[in-house]
Image: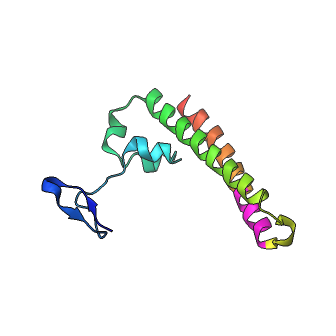
Amino acid sequence: MAFEGGEKGEQVKGGSPKSKQFMTLQKAVDMGEYDPEYLATFPEWFTLSRHVQFQFIKQGLDNRRRQLWLQWAEINNTPNFHLKPHLAIALTNVEKQIKKLDSDWEKFFVKYS
């Protein structure tokens, strides 16, 4: 199926998009990125005060925490969970990520406070 789009009613049929979509600092944080080393790959990171950088980090941590707990709930609420031992491994992996997230939160709080 072709979609109307672009200039002069040209049709776009799959394949690569006409314009590239770039990741922005805000999009990355919204998706749960919080590591300052990764966030520093965005040029605007260096224009922000230390306080604002920490607010972005905290927002990324909160978003990532929400995502991990959602994953945990989805796995835990799988029908017949007790009959699927591989899901117990996935649940344990999510729990490890949550513990790492808590540790990272403490580390960044000390570093940026």
Name the residue located 42 percent from the left edge and 45 percent from the top edge: 27
Percent x, y of residue 85: 82, 72
Q: Quadrant of the N terminus?
A: bottom left
Asked whether residue 72 is drawn in magenta, I would say: no
Percent x, y of residue 10: 17, 61
Percent x, y of residue 71: 67, 54
Answer with left or right where residue 68 lies relative to residue 29: right
Answer with left or right where residue 12 lies relative to residue 86: left
Answer with left or right where residue 42 lies relative to residue 5: right
Name the residue located 39 percent from the left edge and 45 percent from the top edge: 40
Name the residue located 65 percent from the left edge and 38 percent from the top edge: 106
- Front one among 52 and 68: 68
Q: Main secondary structure of the magenta part?
A: helix
With respect to residue 5, does 66 lie above or below? above
Name, please, the residue furthest toward the front.
1
Stretch of the chain drawn in magenta: 86-94
Name the residue located 15 percent from the left edge and 54 percent from the top edge: 7
The answer to which image quadrant residue 91 occupies is bottom right
